Image: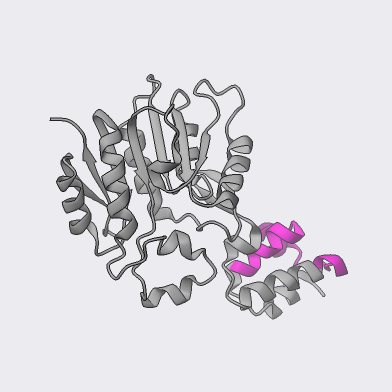
Amino acid sequence: MTRDEWLRASGVERSDALALLRELAGVSRAALLAHPEAGLDSACLEALERAAEALRGGLPLAYVLGWREFYGLRLELNRHVLIPRPDTEVLVDFALEHLDRSLAAEVLDLGTGSGAIAIAIAHERPLARVRGVDASAEALELARRNAERLLPPERPGGAALWHQGDWMGALGPEVGDFDLIVSNPPYVAAGDPHLAALRHEPALALVGARACADGLGDIRVLVAQAAPRLRDGAWLALEHGYDQAAAVRDLLQRAGLREVHSLRDLAGIERVTAGRAGK
């Protein structure tokens, strides 16, 4: 079978089929255009068909390929973690705006998953000491691998540090307070109809351990635990659902944070809310 014949017969979106050809057969778009008649060997065809079948069954492309780009970094992925979304880069942008490149800040990423947020911050702010917390041992193992591959071993801020457990309870008594705490926590409401489309992603990362009707169960606990661990002037910034900004602002204000405000994502939706400790 030729490259062009497989592309037309794959049964998946053209963009996804092109991605499979590139990743599994080493055929770029330019190579396909130049030589559509070139053949594919049997081993390559078998790998392409397995991947296309997974896509036809609804498995997201990022899981099929085993990676996703986030903040310019190629992150290894598997089904133990959420697929990083472009909107989450708004949270990273906020973090970088509030971290001085010349200071050795203490940073915490709660619910780190693949390590996407923590590693992006550590990559851009090499003096910062970054920690990531997750309830899933499998997620933390993936985050470790991503950090080892993407962060230079001689990084002045040291390697990212990983802690397993339930929010701030994962941190031992030797860990002090923070200059910045960020999180993309579970915030999907129990019974949300969109969960069906997200069935391949881990439920714990979507609805959390405290599933509830408004999706804020884990966020309430996170805010209550994290706010007291902020140094004076430090920020807590959270990603949340499209209709949760007002509720999250209220939670941050009730926790005693000031300068509370929300940031909009690429679609103009209030997606990240932040507040600052201090008087």
Q: Residue at x 62, y 73 (%)?
A: 55
Q: Which residues are magenta?
A: 16-44
Q: Position of residue 259 (x, y in %)?
A: 15, 39
Work out whether residue 41 can be spotted: no
Q: Is residue 20 magenta?
A: yes
Q: Position of residue 203 (x, y in %)?
A: 48, 65
Q: Is residue 262 left or right of residue 195?
A: left
Q: Which of the pair 61/26 is nearer the observer?
A: 61
Q: Residue at x 60, y 28 (%)?
A: 152
Work out whether residue 30 can be spotted: yes
Q: Is residue 41 left or right of residue 101?
A: right
Q: Position of residue 232 (x, y in %)?
A: 23, 27
Q: Residue at x 45, y 33 (%)?
A: 172
What is the residue that sits farthest to the left in this orientation? Answer: 279
Q: Where is the N terminus found, in terms of image quarters?
A: bottom right
Judge whether 182 appears above or below 159 on screen: below
Assign the magenta stretch its main secondary structure. helix
Q: How is the image coloured?
A: one colour
Quarter of the view holding residue 37: bottom right
Q: Position of residue 243 (x, y in %)?
A: 24, 64
Q: Is residue 162 left or right of residue 193?
A: right
Judge whether 69 appears above or below 14 on screen: above
Q: Is residue 109 magenta?
A: no
What is the residue that sits farthest to the right in this orientation? Answer: 42
Q: How many marks?
A: 0
What is the residue that sits farthest to the front in this orientation? Answer: 173
Judge whether 262 appears above or below 226 on screen: below
Q: Where is the C terminus found, in terms of image quarters?
A: top left
Quarter of the view holding residue 99: top left
